[in-house]
Amino acid sequence: MTTLTNKFLPNPKTIAVVGCPFSGGQPKLGVDKGPIHLVEAGLITRLEELGWRVLFDGHHQFEEISAASDPPIGKLQNPRHVSRVCESVAEVVGAHVRNGQLPVTLGGDHSLAMGTISGTLSSYPDACVIWVDAHADINTAETTSSGNIHGMPVSFLLGLGEKIPEYAWVKPLLRPERLVYIGLRDLDAGEKRILRENNIKAFSMHEVDKYGIGRVVDMALDHVNPNRDLPIHLSFDVDALDPSVAPSTGTPVRGGLTFREGHYICEAIHETGLLVALDLMEVNPSLADPESVRQTVAVGCSLVCSALGE
């Protein structure tokens, strides 16, 4: 049992677990099973043992949000389906935040962050986003080569690129100076240009190697939250971790964060007392052997628990 200090949450401190079994932002099947595995691994009980009150009313079923006809818009794949699901996630997360709860969204693919971060910003327009990922996920409709929207949510949140009517609901409330990346190591040329042009702070694995994770987290917080008084939305893609640590994910890239580095980020964010929303994305139980799946799910659970005080 820990003492839970959080500058934004009323007592009793409450987490709302939002299970999002959704894979529409990318082509590989199975990432929609991630949240179910995480919950079955005992995550809810572990959070309760940390002293949280935990609300969980089952996983969100997105069957009714299908888009019968969903041809590409330009290059974008499944654009209407992804938009509708993310909009519904934004409403759910936004309602939890308004109710003074800390939403913990279990993905699912990272396109969902368009919804989760929109939900956070609807109540906390000055929130900062710490995006832990091998990828910047900031391609626009013009720069994407694949059209997979899980590589694009940040550009929608910042309001970059051409306006697509289906995504008019995404308010560009995120400001470039309120966003920081940790763990990047696989960027498209277009994304590098977008980061540079918008002056977005990113700590790649090179910086993690050079300065050590403790210093990197301090520098990241100094950049987006210099007075340590703004709410924090932590969006964590398990592929930020090295594939030897979290093998069961859709786009693994060698040379990632170690087990401890990933956990340190979560622990340090918890220690600020400023966390108001957490995403854990891209656990895909169908992409590896059973032992790798078990390992990745266990790591996912322990990252969430570390961000919430373990």
Image (spheres, rainbow, N blue to C red):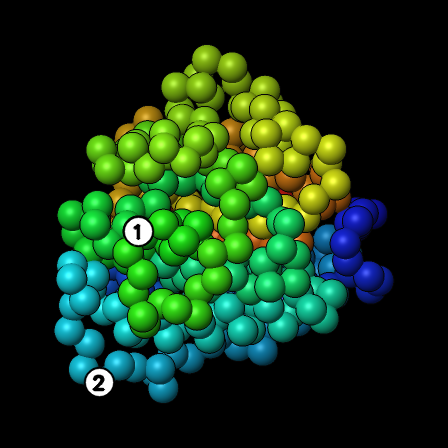
Q: What element carries label 1?
A: loop
- Closest to the observer: 308 or 289? 308
- Closest to the observer: 108 or 163? 163
Residue positioned 69% across, 69% down in the render: 98
One can see residue 289 in this view: no
Residue positioned 62% across, 49% down in the render: 127
**In the rendered image of this protein, does residue 159 appear above or below residue 55?**
above
Q: How far apart are marks 2 and 1 (CA)?
A: 26 Å
Residue 236 position in % (x across, y down): 48, 46
Give residue 33's quadrant in the image: bottom left
- Closest to the observer: 204 or 83? 83
Query: Which disc is residue 297 wearing?
Result: none
Three-letter amino acid code at disc 1? Gly
User: Which residue does the numbered mark 1 point to in the structure image?
Assistant: 161
Residue 35 position in % (x across, y down): 45, 63
In screen coordinates, is 10 left or right of 38? right
Residue positioned 36% across, 29% down in the render: 196
Three-letter amino acid code at disc 2? Ala
- Closest to the observer: 102 or 245? 102
Question: Mark 2 near mark 1, Cβ–Cβ under 8 Å?
Answer: no
Residue positioned 59% across, 24% down in the render: 219
Residue 145 position in % (x across, y down): 16, 48
Query: Which disc is residue 68 wearing?
Result: 2
